[in-house]
Image (cartoon, rainbow, N blue to C red):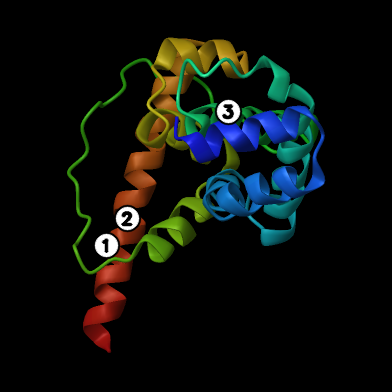
């Protein structure tokens, strides 16, 4: 935690508007990208981001400087996105698969930009997108995801496997489309 972050947290705890604005400005851009990974539209992502910062400012007293401020903020943003999906019934999980293929060949290329990847992730069905984000990007284990989403561990694994398969197909289609141009 840098002195500037300590100062920001202290100011936010005092409900100082300038500190709140500085904290928002420092993290909003990165956290909007996180929101966009969970929801499909920018408007929804901005709603989730706004709700997240309301929670951040309400819970700032609980931040104990035991982890990086960015990690604490990101956890709130991810949880807010999950609550948004749950409240709006935006995810649906397919039936569990008996056998889940854990490894699908990776076809990502260096020329694929992060914005292109974000667009591909947004094209995943909501259940796959949510599990993919939690497992592949946020680093949660399938057991934790199952608890967070109130699904079985097998469903989490099957959704992740399906997401990888769909991403592989989308990446292949992306590569084919690029070769045509």
Number of labelled discs? 3
Mark closest to the chain's N terminus, 3 or 2: 3
Q: Are marks 2 and 1 in contact (CB under 8 Å)?
A: yes
Circle 3 packing at 10 Å, graded few (<14), some (14-19), many (20+), is some
Report the residue marked by disc 2: 169
Where residue 52 appears, x then y in whole percent?
71, 37
User: Residue reaching furthest bottom?
Assistant: 181
Label 1 secondary element:
helix
Instruction: Compute the Cα span from label 2 to label 1.
Output: 5 Å
Label 3 secondary element:
loop
Name which residue lies at 38% across and 48% down.
166
- Side of 8 where 177 appears, left or right: left
Where residue 76 appears, x then y in whole percent?
63, 29
Instruction: Compute the Cα span from label 3 to label 2.
Output: 20 Å
- Side of 86 where 160 appears, left or right: left
Q: Nearer the viewer, residue 171 or 97?
A: 171
Name which residue lies at 34% across and 41% down.
164
Name which residue lies at 22% across and 38% down.
104
Quadrant position of the C terminus in the picture: bottom left
| Labelled disc at residue 34 | none
Where residue 83 appears, x then y in whole percent?
72, 28
- Side of 150 where 118 appears, left or right: left
Quadrant position of the N terminus in the picture: top left
Circle 1 packing at 10 Å, graded few (<14), some (14-19), many (20+), is some
Mark closest to the chain's N terminus, 3 or 1: 3
Q: Nearer the viewer, residue 176 or 61?
A: 61
Name which residue lies at 45% across and 57% down.
118
Work out whether residue 107 can be spotted. yes
| Labelled disc at residue 93 | 3
Report the residue marked by disc 1: 172
Work out whether residue 85 can be spotted. no
Label 2 secondary element:
helix
């Amino acid at each position: 935690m840098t002195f500037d972050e300590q100062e920001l947290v202290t100011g936010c705890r005092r409900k100082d508007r300038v500190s709140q604005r500085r904290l928002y400005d420092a993290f909003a851009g990165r956290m909007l990208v996180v929101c966009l990974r969970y929801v499909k539209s920018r408007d929804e992502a901005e709603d989730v981001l706004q709700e997240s910062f309301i929670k951040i400012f309400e819970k700032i007293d609980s931040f104990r400087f035991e982890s990086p401020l960015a990690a604490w903020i990101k956890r709130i943003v991810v949880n807010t996105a999950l609550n948004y999906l749950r409240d709006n019934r935006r995810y649906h999980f397919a039936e569990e698969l008996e056998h889940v293929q854990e490894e699908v060949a990776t076809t990502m290329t260096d020329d694929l930009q992060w914005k292109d990847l974000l667009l591909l992730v947004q094209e995943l069905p909501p259940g796959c997108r949510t599990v993919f984000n939690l497992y592949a990007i946020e680093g949660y284990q399938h057991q934790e995801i199952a608890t967070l989403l109130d699904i079985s561990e097998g469903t989490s694994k099957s959704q992740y496997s399906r997401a990888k398969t769909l991403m592989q197909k989308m990446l292949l289609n992306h590569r084919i489309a690029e070769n045509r141009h």
